[in-house]
Image: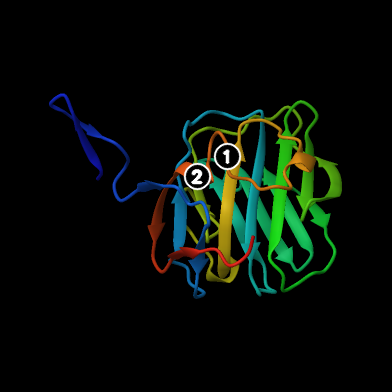
């Protein structure tokens, strides 16, 4: 546990094993298929969400299903889930419901994916490499719960666990950001560093199992 002594008071800064880092220019590598390698992301604030925007960049050569971002609560394992069903088919899950977006096949290139969702209309939007893939609707009027385990590298089927090796991520993920509001995705071309819940430049995280941090290979 990281501890800080301020004026004689001992403060626990973060939970056990976690750290904060400026991840600018770096990527998490998930070098092997496993059900044990993952990174827990710790948001700056825990709050229920009436909307959100999630952006990340990734590279993989997987052709089977895999999870890119898994936000699970005690009652809904797929409270927020960004999942790739197969090459060119992206799923956004909110509150255990899902919509699917088809994307042009570009199987072995790094990709930049951004999604947003708002409760008021239920509209979910997915952009891939700076291009819109359309809009669909789900969970109109819903609120995403605050108390969540946020995991990359594995897909949660229970709160913080029940990983399926055949839905694990193998490859590299970088520039993960999460906002508590809808950010216009056409403005996201330049990068996605500074989410107000998850910020790549001041990332609170805890890595588990075989996860390696290295300078990123791609922009
Ligand atoms: Ca799940």
Q: Position of residue 102 (x, y in %)?
A: 84, 58
Where is mark 1, residue-wise?
A: 194
Q: Residues within 10 Å of mark 1 (few under 14, many from 20)?
A: some
Q: Residues within 10 Å of mark 2 (few under 14, many from 20)?
A: many
Residue at 57%, 43% (x, y): give it.
Answer: 76
What quarter of the picture does the N terminus occupy? top left
Residue at 52%, 28% (x, y): give it.
Answer: 47
At mark 1, the secondary structure is loop
Picture layout, residue 141 above or below residue 66: above
Q: Is residue 204 left or right of residue 184?
A: left
Q: Position of residue 157 (x, y in %)?
A: 54, 55
Quarter-wise, where is residue 51 in the image? top right
Residue at 12%, 26% (x, y): give it.
Answer: 8
Q: Position of residue 70 (x, y in %)?
A: 57, 51
Where is mark 2, residue-wise?
A: 201
Q: Is residue 94 left or right of residue 33?
A: right
- Work out how far the residue at label 1 is from the one at label 2, CA to CA, in angstroms: 7 Å
């Amino acid at each position: 546990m990281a501890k800080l002594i301020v004026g004689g008071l001992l403060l626990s800064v973060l939970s056990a094993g976690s750290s904060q880092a400026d991840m600018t220019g770096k990527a998490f590598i998930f070098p092997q298929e496993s059900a044990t390698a993952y990174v827990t992301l710790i948001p700056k604030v825990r709050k229920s969400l009436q909307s959100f925007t999630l952006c990340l960049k990734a590279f993989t050569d997987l052709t089977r299903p895999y999870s890119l971002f898994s936000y699970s609560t005690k009652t809904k394992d797929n409270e927020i889930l960004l999942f790739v069903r197969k090459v060119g088919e992206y799923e956004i899950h909110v509150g255990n419901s899902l919509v699917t977006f088809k994307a042009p096949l570009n199987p072995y290139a790094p990709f930049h994916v951004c999604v947003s969702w708002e409760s008021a209309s239920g509209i979910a939007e997915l952009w891939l490499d700076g291009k819109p893939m359309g809009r669909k609707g789900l969970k109109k009027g819903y609120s995403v719960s605050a108390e969540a385990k946020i995991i990359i590298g594995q897909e949660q089927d229970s709160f913080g666990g029940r990983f399926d090796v055949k839905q694990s991520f193998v490859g590299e993920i970088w520039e993960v950001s999460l906002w508590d509001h809808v950010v216009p995705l056409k403005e996201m071309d330049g990068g996605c560093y500074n989410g107000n819940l998850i910020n790549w430049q001041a990332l609170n995280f805890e890595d588990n199992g075989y996860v390696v941090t290295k300078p990123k290979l791609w922009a």
